[in-house]
Each structure stands twice: as structure tokens, then as C-alpha cells.
Amino acid sequence: MGLAALILAGLGFAATAAPTAVTWNVDPASSYIRLTIPDQTLAVEGVGNVTVRMRDATSTTEWTDAGGRRAAIDGEIVTLYDDGHSIAFVGGAHNLYALETTSLRPDPAQWDPATTNYTGTGTAPAALGGRVRASYVLAFDAAFVAFRDVRLDITNATGAPIGITSGTFPADTTRCGIVTALADVDGLELPLELGQPIPDVLHGSLPPVVELNAAGGAITDLGGLSRQLTYTIHIPQLAMDLSGTVVTGSAAGLVVASATLPPPPPLLTARKAGPDLVLAWSTNAAGFSLECAKVLPAATWSPASPAPVIVDGHYVVTNAMTLDTVFYRLRYP
């Protein structure tokens, strides 16, 4: 077929290496995010400066991983990946979320719809949260907080792909954090007739806390086309607005995910055989299909005909050459 066939006759073509879309499946047994909120002083209207301490939901002295400080991560990460060379995290395209495996107060089902106040003491599954303790002359409980429907995001810090050297990519090249979450807050009456400075909140929308990640990551070759992504989370400074009460802290964690890369592009050869053009590629490149178009750039590509036959370990398509111009490509899948 055609002018292009005459030009291509006897030549071999391999697809140029380029980033491809790769979806990484997260291992929730190895992936987590840990939230740390240290003691800090907050100005409480009508009270003054109060020292706030975030604690385990069942403890007045500590905040442990079991009490809502740490949540497992599950889902998928979408990247544009050039094996061993670069990676680009497609922000907004991931399905990355924190599992709700801890029972924390408050329980939204106990909310009083008539007054929009929370008066129960029940718990319900949540991702992160704990007990807010405060000190003002005396130490006392100020609120219970639970974060639910926590969605995470990872994106490149700049628009450029991140270079990979010896299987690793450096710190400060990505941004990550909580992009959406619902905050349920059970504000408590304070002693000494100080009222309830922290209001009750039902499904309050947490503003995004996506920050520059001070850690990097690694890509491990597991053999064949299998790869493992290890992404370390280290955000030393973040601020969370709980309906007007801003608390500061940090986040740390790890995301371990695996993927199977698409097979490498095969070599497409074209040779003239009498009045015919013979196109061929290896049968080792399963899943590729031959397409053709009349012009470039092409609005659409059509399956080339006839269907390929297998000859000596190659898919082979033979066409009679004409004066028409035809362009060919291999497409996967």
C-alpha cells in the first residue's frame, strides 16, 4: 500500500520510549498516614489562652496509634511513568483514602436533627481523631474529634516529571496530604462556668491540607514487568481549620503500591516483497494491534487489514502497494 510503504520498505521502527499511564494498587497492610498534633496554646473567646492537648480517645494522658492517630491507606495511585527514568503523579486522578478502622466519638447517627447538637457519647468508625484536652487552671476535656471520608492526593510539586536515579526520586518533589475530609466534633461544656468554646460540628468540610512533602520515594524492580512504589510521607507543618479553631501539627506515613507495566513496544518492520509491503512484529509482543491512517496527524486510526498471520514467531500483515499514502502504527492494548 502506497507511497509511505515505498519509503518505509526495508526499515524497522520501534516506538520511542515515553511515559505511560500506570495505576499502582496500594497495599493497606503496609500503607498508613499518622497525624501528630502537639500541645499548643489557643486563644479561646471569653476564656483567654488555653493550652490544648490532643489525646487518645480513651486516655487523658497519651495519644496512641490505636486511639486515632494512625490510619491505614488503601486505593490506587495514577502516574505517568517512564520505567527507571521518571514519574509524574496525576493529582486529582487517584483513588486514595484512609480506612475507617477506629471507633471514635462522636457518632453522627446520635446527632439530634432538631437542634443540630450532639449530646450522645457513642462512637462510630473513623479514620483519624481523638480527645481534645485543655488546661486553664485545671485540666479538662474540651472536645472529641473524628475525621471521616478522608481522601488523599499526591501531585508533582512542579509540572515537570520527577527524575528517577538509581531507583529513587528525591524529597521536595511532590505535594501530598488530605484533600477532602468530614470532621465531626463533639464540643464539651467546660468547668468553672466557662461555657462551650469548641462548637459541635456535624460533617464539617475540612479545607485541603495538601503540602510540600519533605520526603521522596523509590521504585523497586520485582522482576519481569512487576514494580513496587514506596512513597514516604513527611509533612513537618500543617494546619487544620476545625470550624474556626485552627490547630497545627505534622503528618508522616508510607504508601506501598504495586503495578504491572505494559509490555515494551515491539519493533515494527516493513519490507518490500515484489508488489507487496510486508509488515511484521514479534509474537512476544502480545496485545499489540496494527492500525493505519491516510494522513498525519490523524483524527482517527483504523485497524489495518488483512488480519495478521503468524510466520516464524512474528505477526505478519501483507498488503499490495498502490499509489495511496498510508501510515502504520502499533497500538497497545
Image (cartoon, rainbow, N blue to C red):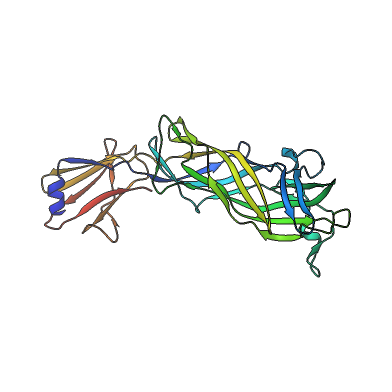
At x 82%, y 41%, the residue is 60
Foreground pick, 248 / 289: 248
Place residue 235 in its image quadrant: top right
At x 75%, y 44%, the residue is 53
Q: Is residue 94 left or right of residue 313?
A: right
Place residue 35 in its image quadrant: top right
Place residue 184 in its image quadrant: bottom right
Foreground pick, 223 / 88: 88
Q: Is residue 262 left or right of residue 104?
A: left
Point out residue 183 in the picture as x, y percentages from the top left corner.
69, 56
Point out residue 292 in the picture as x, y percentages from the top left corner.
25, 54
Point out residue 315 in the picture as x, y percentages from the top left corner.
28, 42
Single out the residue that lies furthest toward the front: 48
Is residue 92 visible to us here? yes
At x 79%, y 47%, the residue is 134
At x 46%, y 39%, the residue is 260
Q: Is residue 101 left or right of residue 76?
A: right
